[in-house]
Image (cartoon, grey):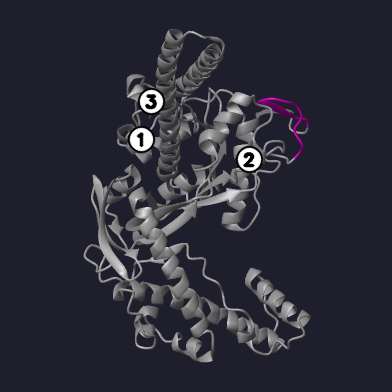
């Protein structure tokens, strides 16, 4: 078994009281970085940064530090400037090769440089020198911390990540030339805590700023965490194809495609939990109608005592609405986490080397389903599904590939003919078989993933979904210990060998995910 190192980055929003001081830091870094880029935008600057080593260490002896910036903060500004210039060295080499008439593969970078050459010609300038182009302009939306002395005991920042809290001490400007230390304590997110328990090591963080929906800057601490991932040798290449299908009866459908074996559908279900989500949604709608009625009464009534009672009632309804919305958000988040965890567990158990999922877009919503289930699809599957699944698969060294979902539901996975019909079941006139739309889509996704894995086409034989039995998961699986809301039915099989023998005897059959908890959801 070979051991590889994987790095995942987790974002933590910093407290608001730091934002105005971080704004000064970022703007100062932006101005100084753009100033340094202009100074280094020449042959001498490029030749200096061709040397091996950290850019900050190389430039420290070349660039004089302004007296109003502390040394460790200026080192990080130097490192950022040096990295930007080093990214331009490769572009300069391509620019010079194109001028010599060399034929290069027209990738995105080469096309971009060709466009710059054409723009120079349009301006009437001879494109014989790369430095005729304008230097890159740094946006100032990141601030490095890697050039500090250490992560936990630096002279610019001190970061300590524990299971319960993240402790940060950072030196920020309070006025021009004046800096002081600020302290912040943040509750450790569950994702970071799990990575710490898995042996993850914290690397030098990066400060970032992004604009929220209100077009205002939010300041974030991005924490890279490095951990060891076990890459197990696979006897043959296998692909797990996943088609998301949010409804009361299922969350997703999967199939396993390999050279020698082809599975029946794997259904991921959480019927009770989804019914609870829909019930809470109805309760929120009912509360909203009550709130509207009370507002109408407030406009109509003239009695001050009655108005006081209505305002009191309105305040109570608002707090009740907020509580239910928070509960709904938490349940949806937990369902997403558990579903991705289960898919990763099945992929690990079946020893697949690739998981293929559809490339999700808002326009890909299943129109044949009702508004309710399109809402389910958008509310917890679209935004975070692929990102969270990829993070969990990387822990086991399994790759994730996004597949174009076009025609995956309406093309027969056996003969590639167009399927006819509406709703969940579609009919293939060539095969004379009725296919479950999601099962058929999962097969087509698995086929595309398998082709990309082996670089050759091999179409599987179809297996009718009727008569599929339930496959139980070994009791040692992390699914049972990890899941609180949704859990797999109690296990019978104890090892992979027993699983293989069961498959030979009964056929590979779907996993049914069942909800067993009501009280824990409410908590």
Which residue in the protein does label 3 denote?
A: 489
Question: Is 427 inside the magenta-drawn segment?
Answer: yes
Separation (CA) of disc 2 from disc 1:
30 Å
Q: Residues within 10 Å of mark 2 (few under 14, many from 20)?
A: few
Q: Nearer the viewer, residue 52 or 465?
A: 52
Q: Where residue 242 appears, x then y in whole percent?
A: 55, 40
Q: Is residue 199 left or right of residue 94?
A: left
Which residue in the protein does label 1 denote?
A: 479
Q: Secondary structure at mark 1?
A: helix
Q: Where residue 6 appears, x then y in whole percent?
A: 38, 59
Separation (CA) of disc 3 from disc 1:
10 Å
Residue at 30% x, 73% y: name it.
72
Q: Residue 129, located in which quarter of the rendered image?
A: bottom right
Does residue 296 lie above or below 446 as drawn?
above
Please tell me which of labels 2 and 1 falls first in the chain. 2
Q: Which residues are magenta?
A: 417-429
Discs 2/3, front: 2
Q: Secondary structure at mark 3?
A: loop
Does residue 189 lie above or below 305 as drawn?
below
Instruction: Find residue 362 and name its label.
Output: 2
Please tell me which of labels 2 and 3 falls first in the chain. 2
Q: Nearer the viewer, residue 205 or 105?
A: 205
**Residue 192 visible in the current orientation:** yes
Q: Where residue 252 appears, x then y in whole percent?
A: 53, 33
Instruction: Find residue 356 and name its label.
Output: none
**Residue 264 visible in the current orientation:** no
Q: Nearer the viewer, residue 114 or 499?
A: 114
């Amino acid at each position: 078994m070979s051991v590889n190192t994987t790095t995942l980055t987790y974002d933590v929003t910093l407290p608001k009281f730091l934002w105005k001081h971080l704004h000064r830091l970022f703007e100062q870094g932006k101005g100084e970085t753009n100033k340094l880029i202009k100074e280094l935008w020449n042959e001498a600057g490029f030749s200096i940064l061709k040397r091996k080593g950290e850019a900050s260490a190389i430039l420290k002896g070349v660039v004089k530090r302004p007296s109003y910036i502390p040394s460790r903060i200026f080192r990080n500004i130097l490192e950022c400037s040096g990295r930007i210039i080093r990214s331009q060295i490769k572009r300069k080499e391509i620019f010079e090769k194109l001028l010599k008439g060399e034929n290069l593969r027209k990738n995105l970078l080469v096309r971009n440089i060709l466009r710059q050459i054409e723009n120079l010609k349009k301006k009437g300038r001879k494109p014989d020198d790369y430095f005729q182009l304008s230097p890159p302009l740094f946006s100032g939306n990141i601030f490095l911390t890697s050039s500090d002395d250490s992560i936990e005991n630096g002279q610019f920042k001190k970061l300590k990540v524990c299971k319960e809290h993240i402790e940060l001490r950072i030196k920020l400007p309070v006025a021009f030339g004046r800096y002081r230390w600020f302290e912040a304590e943040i509750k450790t997110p569950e994702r970071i805590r799990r990575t710490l328990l898995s042996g993850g090591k914290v690397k030098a963080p990066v400060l970032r700023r992004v604009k929220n929906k209100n077009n205002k800057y939010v300041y974030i601490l991005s924490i890279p965490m490095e951990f060891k991932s076990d890459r197990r040798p696979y006897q043959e290449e296998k692909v797990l194809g996943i088609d998301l299908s949010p409804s009361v009866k299922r969350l997703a459908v999967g199939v396993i495609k390999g050279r020698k074996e082809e599975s029946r559908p794997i259904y991921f279900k959480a019927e009770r939990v989804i019914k609870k989500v829909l019930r809470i949604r109805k309760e929120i709608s009912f509360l909203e109608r009550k709130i509207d009625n009370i507002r109408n009464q407030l406009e109509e009534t003239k009695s001050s005592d009655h108005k006081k009672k209505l305002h009191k009632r309105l305040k109570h309804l608002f707090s009740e609405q907020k509580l239910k919305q928070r509960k709904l958000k938490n349940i949806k988040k937990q369902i997403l986490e558990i579903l991705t965890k289960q898919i990763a567990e099945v992929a690990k158990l079946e020893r697949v080397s690739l998981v293929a999922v559809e490339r999700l877009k808002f326009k890909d919503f299943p129109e044949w389903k009702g508004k309710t289930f399109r809402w389910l699809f958008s509310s917890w599957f679209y935004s975070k599904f692929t990102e969270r699944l990829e993070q969990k698969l990387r822990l086991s060294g399994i790759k994730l590939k996004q597949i174009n979902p076009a025609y995956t539901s309406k093309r027969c996975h056996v003969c590639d003919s167009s399927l006819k019909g509406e709703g969940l079941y579609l009919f293939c006139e060539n095969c004379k078989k009725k296919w479950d739309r999601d099962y058929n889509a999962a097969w087509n996704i698995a086929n595309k993933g398998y082709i990309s894995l082996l670089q050759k086409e091999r179409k599987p034989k179809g297996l009718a979904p009727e008569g599929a039995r339930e496959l139980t998961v070994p009791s040692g699986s992390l699914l049972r210990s990890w899941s609180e809301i949704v859990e797999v039915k109690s296990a019978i099989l104890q090892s992979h060998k027993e699983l293989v023998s069961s498959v030979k005897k009964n056929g590979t059959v779907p996993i049914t995910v069942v909800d067993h908890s009501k009280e824990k959801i409410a908590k």
